[in-house]
Structures are given as structure tokens and as C-alpha cells.
Amino acid sequence: MKHILPLLSLALLIWFPAKGWAQHTLKEAFADDFLVGAAIDYGELRDTSAVLHELIRNEFSAIVCENSMKADHTEPREGIFNFSGGDAVVDYAERNGQVVTGHCLVWHSQCPSWMFGPDSTGRPVDREMLIRRMRNHIYGVCGHYRGKVKGWDVVNEAIESDGSWRKSEYYRILGDEFIALAFQFAHEADPDAELYYNDYGMESPRKREAVVRLIRNLKARGLSIDAVGMQSHLSLWTNLDEYERSIEAFAAEGVKVMATELDVSVLPWPGSVNPELVEGQNADISTNFEYHERYNPYRDGLPDDVLAQQADFYRHLFAIYRRHADVITRVTFWGVHDGTSWLNNFPIRGRTNYPLLFDRNLQRKPFVDEIIRDAAAPSQQ
Ligand code: XIL
């Protein structure tokens, strides 16, 4: 009997913390650090799985629309707005007590073609016409979501990986001034909303420098920018030292930083012989390669060693977020679980990718408990 008590308490000691971490959710674990978000949309809203909705409610404190607040959805024809998708997501998040952010106002992709087309009299678009359309679009969308959305990705992806301006239609017609105009209109339409610049590939040093110039330029014009959104479409081969340098560089400009579209691909980027070079890797949604078996190596399941690599990568990444928790306000995943991630169809359609924290059966990957346990320990500077 006298041996049983110490043994019992030892068993309890081992058992309780182990169970305790599993009971914590992501949003609880990081409640003092930053919001933890997920992109959802009509797919999730239509899904009748109680398990899915419980997961979204319990694990995430922030929500963003994966597609429904983009210009092709909100203003499919000039002056004809459609907020049905976005409103449904906002209602859902409100019922769950989650913070909503808006994505996105000005972007070269998923932008309706009328934006750059001739007007109803056949007059081709010019500077003045485009400014008017941009203003009407931003006023319409920001005005509608005023008070419901905490902040907006005002401009998405205006800079190339080499630091040059993306030669989008906005840029061709207005030059880089379109960015300042977009920030000005967004502020006029909703003075209480936070305003963000959002882009992928932020670990690239030249892109980092260009974003720093962009922040300075906006501030020099008297415009406010609250945060930089690092989309964070990463892969196992992303250089996290460079990524962390970008967080530091943006924070040094006096803005907050957010990971806005986080996922960690485990699949090879097509065309790059050595995946560690991640040549040409990007998140430009117009990129499209032909399917080939060799680019889809884990169709039947993720091997343990790759899962272990992903665990290390995510733990390292969250250690970085925690180190910079004073400037990081939100970490949002681009999707809820691997089964519905956009990366199953980008940049090649029909692959089986594993980029998120929840697997196809809506189960937490085993390393999530480790991330949560790490969150309770003092951060390593
Ligand atoms: C993606 C969505 O996930 C897809 O459903 C859609 O077909 C294309 O766009 N950068 C962004 C996001 O800013 O809006 C993109 O989302 C992914 C890359």
C-alpha cells in the first residue's frame, strides 16, 4: 500500500499535463499573444459537420473570408454590389465571438474585368475613370462592413519578389500612386478600420526592402498604415531566418505585423530540381503547372519523416511569432484543414498536400500539442 500512493501521484503528474495540453485550444494558448485565425467561406458554412464547426469555434479567435470579400464577388458588375457571401461569414463569426478582417480591396487577381474595361459609352478606361471606380468600390465595400470588420487588406501583392512594382493594370494606369489612393479611400470610408498592406514571399530581402519603402512613402504622405500582412504561404524549405528579419524590419517602421494566410506546403515546387532552392516559388494565383505524378509524392499519406520535418518547421515558426508577440497581432491560417486547403490545387491541380495543423479527418496533428506546450513556457529571446 505504501508504494501505491507515490506511484499514483507520479502517474497523475505524468497524465495531467499530457491531457492538459491537449485540452487547450490554439486560441486559448495564444490569447495573451495574438489572435489565431482561419480563412473560411461558403464551403465551410454549407458543411453540416458539427465537428468542423466546433473546431472552428474552439480553436480560432479570428476569421477572414477566403474569397467572398474579393472584388469579383463584392462588385461583379460596376455599381452592383453583392455582399451575400461576406455577410454570411460575418454573421457566423459574430455568433462565435470571433474577430473579422477584410480581404481584400485592391488586387490584380480576382478583380472583375469591368474595372479596366471601357465605360458604357465605349470610352476606354483612363486615370480619372479608374480612380473613380476604385473609390466607388472601396467606399461601397468598406462602407458596408463598417463596424463589422476590424481591418482591411487594402492593397494585396503590389510588389514582385525582386522588389520592383508589379506591372498590374492598376500600376500601368496609375503608377504606384494607386496604393496611396487606396489607403486614402479606405480611411475615408471607414476611419475606424485598421489598414494593412498584404503580400506573399516577404522573406525575400528585396521584397522586404520594397515594403519598408512603401510604408515610409505612405507615412510621408500623411497616410496611416497599421500593419503589414505577411501572407506566409511557406514551404518546408522557406528560410525562416530571412522571414524573421522581415518581421523585425517591418516592426522597426512602427507598424504591427500579421501572418495573414499561413500554410506550410510539404510538396515540391515544380521545376525546381533542388527544393531547398525554392526557385520561383510564389503564391501568385495565376501560376499553373501541368500535373505529373512526381510532383504528387504523398497521395496515399504523409510519411512520418516528412511529418516530423513539418513539426520542426511549425515549432520554429511559432517560436518566432512568440519572440515578436509585442508586434504580432494575428496569425491566420489559410483554411481549416488539409482536405480543403487551396494548396491541393495550387500551383498544380489535383495534388494531395498537408499544409495546415488539422488533418483530413479534422484531427489535430500530433505536434499541435507541442506548439501549445511551448506557448506556456517562457519565450527564448
Ligand atoms: C486563393 C483562394 O484560397 C482560392 O480559393 C482561390 O481560388 C484563389 O485565391 N493569396 C491571396 C489569397 O491573397 O486571396 C489567395 O486565395 C491565395 C494567395
Image: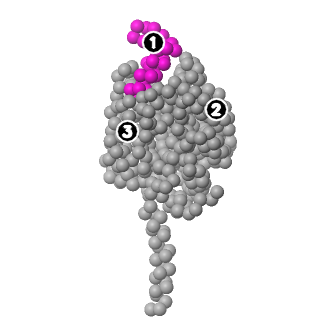
**Residue 20 in the figure: left or right of residue 42:** right
The residues tagged by marks 3 and 2 sit, at their Cα atoms, a distance apart of 31 Å
For the residue pair 149 and 208, the one nearer the viewer reads as: 149
Disc 1: CA contacts within 10 A as few (<14), some (14-19) or many (>=20): some
Q: Indicate the amino acid at tag 2.
A: Arg
Is residue 292 visible in the rendered image? The answer is no
The residues tagged by marks 3 and 1 sit, at their Cα atoms, a distance apart of 34 Å
Which residue is disc 2 drawn over? 213
Give the residue drawn at x 36%, y 49%.
97
Helix, strand or loop status at disc 1: loop
Disc 3: CA contacts within 10 A as few (<14), some (14-19) or many (>=20): some
Which residue is disc 3 drawn over? 148
* Residue 118 numbered mark, or none: 1
Give the residue drawn at x 37%, y 34%.
145
Residues at discs 3 and 2 in contact (Cβ within 8 Å): no
* Residue 228 numbered mark, or none: none
Rendered location of residue 321, percent (x, y): 57, 51
Q: Indicate the amino acid at tag 3.
A: Lys
Q: Indicate the amino acid at tag 1.
A: Pro
